Amino acid sequence: MASPPTSWKPCAIHELQAHLGNFTDWILCGGHSIDLLVGSHTRGHGDIDIGVFRSRLTECLEAIGKDRVFLCSAGAHIQWPGDNIDPAIHDIWISDPSHEHWIFQIMVYDDQGDTVSYRRDKRITWKKSSHSIQLGDIRILNPAITLLYKTNKPPLADKEAADVSTLIEFCGARDITHLDGL
C-alpha cells in the first residue's frame, strides 16, 4: 500500500481524461466549473474536482487504477482496496502515478435510476438530465447544484463565498426571455 501524498499539484482540465482512461461519464465541478461557466478566471484554485454518479463509481476507479485512489473517511485518506465503496464515502482523492501529489478529487453523487439525491437532505432530488450542462466539449455541474453544495457549509470558506457571489452575479446578468408569457 502506498502512502498518501501530502500536497496538491492539480492536473489541468485538459489532462483529466488521460487520468480517467476510458471512463467518460464524469463532469467538472467546483471553482473550475464556475470559471468555465462565466468565461473567466474568478479566483485561485488549489485543487480540481470532478463528479461521478455512485452507480458508475467502481468503473471510474478501476479505470484510474486502485493504487492511485484514496477514499476520504473521517479525516483520513485510505487507499482503495478495490472492493465496494461504503455509501458514506462522498470524496475520493486521486494521486499522480508516483504518489507525490494529489492531482484531482472525485465528488460522488448518489443516484438511483434516473434520479440524483442531495446527500445532506434526501428530500432534494433532480433528474440526471438536469445534473450537468454542456459547455463546448466539457460537461459541468449544474450551477444551481453547485450553489446548493457551497452554501450548506456554514461558516463559508472564502473560496465558497467567492464562488457563490460569482454565480449570483453571473445568473443575475442573464436575460431570460422565454418567461415573457407568464
Image (cartoon, rainbow, N blue to C red):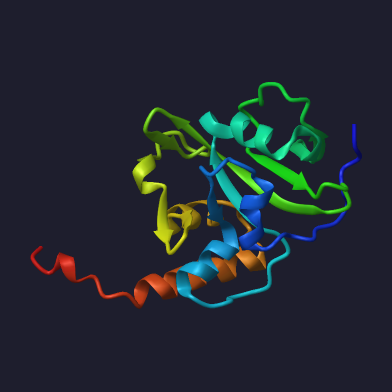
- How far across and how far down the image is residue 148, in percent? 47, 52
- How far across and how far down the image is residue 50, in percent? 59, 50
Query: Going 79% across and 61% down the picture, which residue do you hit?
Result: 9
Query: Going 74% across and 36% down the picture, which residue do you hit?
Result: 65
Is residue 169 depicted above or below 61 in this figure? below
Is residue 160 depicted above or below 174 in this figure? above
* Location of residue 58 (image quadrant): top right
Query: What quarter of the picture does the N terminus occupy?
Result: top right
Query: Going 66% across and 36% down the picture, which residue do you hit?
Result: 63
Residue 174 located left or right of residue 169: left
Residue 113 located left or right of residue 78: left
Taking the view exactly as shown, the residue that stands out farthest to the left is: 181
Closest to the observer, 76 or 14: 14
Residue 61 located left or right of residue 115: right
Query: How many tags in the picture?
Result: 0
Query: Going 88% across and 48% down the picture, which residue do you hit?
Result: 98
- How far across and how far down the image is residue 182, in percent? 10, 63
- How far across and how far down the image is residue 120, in percent? 53, 39
Residue 33 located left or right of residue 20: left
Is residue 113 depicted above or below 48 in this figure? above
